[in-house]
Amino acid sequence: MIAKQAGKSMLHKQAFAPAHVGITVFDPEANKYIYNHNGDKLFIPASNTKLFSLYAGLKYLGDSIIGARYRIIDTTIQIETSGDPTFLHPDFANQPLYNFLNQPRFKKIELHTSFAAKPLGRGWAWDDYAEDYMAERDPFPMYGNLATFTYKNDILTTVPSLPVAGKPEKNQPWNVSRNLGGHFFIIQNGKGNTVPTKQLTIAMESGAFASRLLADTLHKDVTDIETALHLNDALVLYSQPKDSLFKIMMHRSDNFFAEQTLLMASNERLGIMSDSRMIDTLLKTDLKALPQQPKWVDGSGLSRYNLFSPQDFVWLLNKLKTENNFERLKVILPTGNEGTLKGLYINNQGNIFAKTGTLSNTVALSGYLITQKNKTLLFSVLINNHQSTASLIRKGIEDFLTRLIEKY
């Protein structure tokens, strides 16, 4: 039945004809695969990679994210950065670290970092450096490492405050550009559209720019020191419940949150923020029993160097479900007509909880199905090299999974 439906919904459709298609469906109760089509082959998974970063975060971060470790010496506070992406982020109104650092008793702030990653990941498209979906990784992120430009009532404002050349022309298309590796922004009139708000990434210079930005924000003396303190007597200041970060990360498919989650997990597990070392450690320990040997290079899935099999994702989904409360996972992952599944699986809210993935010529979806007979199934569908529209590919996958929900 499943093989016939896979053919009808996807494999025999024209949109899928030139594509490399992998499908795995697993019954955890019976502990067996109930359908495999290229399930052991490797695919570029796009943002399905975030499921692996989610695992790292759930495994190695506490109930709340560590905003910073610190030590106070007279009027100086020494901060050991943690990679927390929520600091001054507009999604998080409560800012415990900012409120703490803003106390008048602190005259000087030292930022100590242990950062062994690069701002941009391996295999990322370099010419997307200014796009808001490719914010740079950083030991001490601020404002989501994004600059927000708003043009309203003939007034241009930026958050944070940054140098800008030019000004939008009223009721005319406009855009903003910045030079690679710098912080000088230029208004480009006659390009883009007239929407009032635009976002670009900020080049973070491995924390040096963050220290200057923090000094401007707090009006205090801030020094960046690129060595970790590793304080035995450090106090800990927590920022946000980690599931609040994970829900946004998975519902919005937030690349920056995923990258920083992997770095934060590395900081807690290894004492240093290193995506490559954390990935290597996970693959040799917690994830050593993966069915195939994947190539995993970043936290978000922006890289086309990533290679995983559908069976790898089903194995991980089963491990996530075994090690965590399933109801918790249902909150973190989007369901039908929610988050990145908006407009899909509208009649199956509560029957599917899954992570999407999209790059050009690549569509992926992996997650959990709860069938009409109350059976839980784990699935992964990875599509590479299609030449159709992503919406047509998604509709084919939706038809296949909907039939599974209804019939199995």
Image: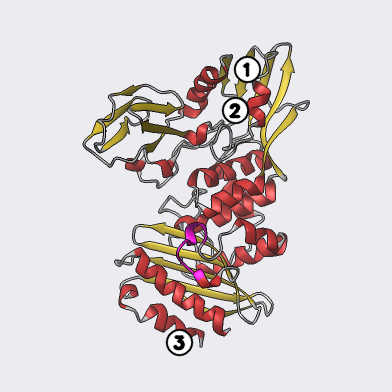
187 and 133: which is toward the camera: 187
User: Distance from label 2 to label 3 (Cα)?
Assistant: 55 Å
Q: Secondary structure at mark 3?
A: helix
Residue nearest the viewer, comparing 355 with 150: 150
Quarter holding the C terminus is bottom right
Residue on which the image places disc 1: 109
Q: Is residue 80 visible?
A: no
User: According to the image, label 3 marks what residue?
Assistant: 4
Residue of label 2: 113
Coloration of the structure image: secondary structure
Residue located at (73% from left, 18% from top) = 72
Q: Give SS at disc 2.
A: loop
Picture coordinates of residue 123, whole percent (x, y): 40, 47
Q: Taking 18 as reference, is 338 left or right?
A: right
**Amino acid of disc 1:** Ile
Q: Nearer the viewer, residue 205 or 236?
A: 236
What span is in magenta?
Answer: 338-346
